[in-house]
Amino acid sequence: MVDLSDDELLAELGVEVETPKARTYTPRQERIIAGFEDIVRFYEEHGRAPLHGEDRDIFERLYAVRLDRLRELEECRELLTDMDKHGLIAGTQSEGQVSPTEIDDDALLAELGVEPAGEDDIRVLRHVQSAEERRAAEEIANRTKCADFYRFKPLFEQVERDLESGARSTRRFVKDAGFLKADITKGQFFILGGQIAYIAEVGDTFKAPNGELDARLRVIYSNGTESDLLRRSMQRALYKDDAGRRITEIEAGPLFAAETEEGDLESGTIYVLRSKSDHPMVAENRNLIHKIGVTGGSVETRIAGADKSATYLLAGVEVVATYKLFNINRVQLEGVIHKVFAGAALDLTIPDRFGNPVKPREWFLVPLPVIDEAVTRIQVGSITGYVYDRTQARLVSA
């Protein structure tokens, strides 16, 4: 007779063998079992149950707290009894343990040697930063003492004087104002974190991991420190700083920009006029004689009644050019323009309406293209040191 197994013998006798069904677990039960298996592995490696105590490894202390909880909860005892081949669930709690029914989250962290996070704790994730933002913040904070600050101190002192006098101004640093990363260049000043920041050096341009161009900067701060952050990090920090500002160049900035930026305050208009006077000298040099002025109001209002005012040579005038001003001291700017063209001032005396001799001011023997060049130089900050040479009919370095 052939030997049959028990199952085969039962099958021969017509008895149906019932195959035990594999037990299924809920996700919560699976997590409980997985946590218990960690404790079992610890027991098998060390020959004992995990214990509490500050001198214990943090993982052992974690397993000890977990084991206490498993022992306390009836649901866990019922689930794990068949798996508890070492009698861990049935064991007694270790001396000095904390009852898991009385322990809250902060107490559990304390039991593990981790201090609970306070309101200002950086581990509390309220506004999670990207990796780039974290790197930018680290670079901004990572400032060192500037060994050659004596070289830069006079620059900061001059900038402060310029701001006080109005020669320089500060502009809000906003994304939609047309400010690009490439605009951060050597020699510029900014206000960041309450300190004036000077771009002393700009390294070679390279392509960042995201494909954008970037460069390493050497930034000197007015408190005598420096940092070597990336240009993109500098830009990001200025965007995030509510008090972040860009300091304009002397007589520079968008004084006469075709498009204004957010926050710009209109200061007025430079106007260039051509006289319709029939005075022999004026008639002979009509395309050369121009009045250059600045007004805070309407140019049309300013020249109304020109034919009755000696200021306008008692004749009508033609507006041949205008330039809008933003965030600039009109009086100071007008003084700069008149200084540049002082050598070409019109020397003409005419009688006023009452017959009194009057010498009109702000009229110059200057071609319109040269006036336009002067305005452009003021706009880009390169007018310093230039004057108009009548013999050459152009701007020259003084």
Image (cartoon, rainbow, N blue to C red):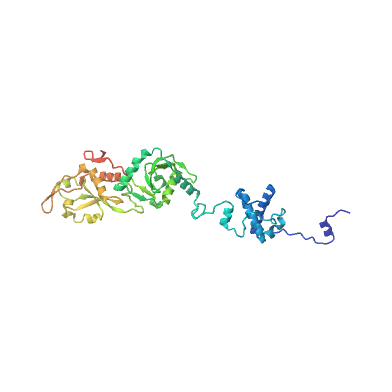
Q: Nearer the viewer, residue 224 or 253?
A: 224
x and y percentages locating residue 335 in the rendered image: 24, 46
Quarter of the figure with the C terminus: top left
- Residue 170 can be seen, yes or no: yes
x and y percentages locating residue 129 in the rendered image: 49, 51
Which residue sits furthest front? Answer: 95
- In the displayed structure, would residue 384 be above or below residue 21? above
Q: How many marks?
A: 0
Residue sitting at x 66%, y 58%: 71
Which residue sits furthest left? Answer: 355
Residue 197 sits in quarter: top left
Residue sitting at x 66%, y 52%: 39
Which residue sits furthest right? Answer: 1
Quarter of the figure with the N terminus: bottom right
| Left or right, residue 190 beside residue 356 | right
- In the displayed structure, would residue 352 be above or below residue 395? below
| Left or right, residue 90 beside residue 370 | right
x and y percentages locating residue 308 in the rendered image: 16, 55
Residue sitting at x 36%, y 38%: 150
- Residue 24 can be seen, yes or no: no
x and y percentages locating residue 242 in the rendered image: 40, 52
| Left or right, residue 320 beside residue 113 | left
Residue 158 sits in quarter: top left
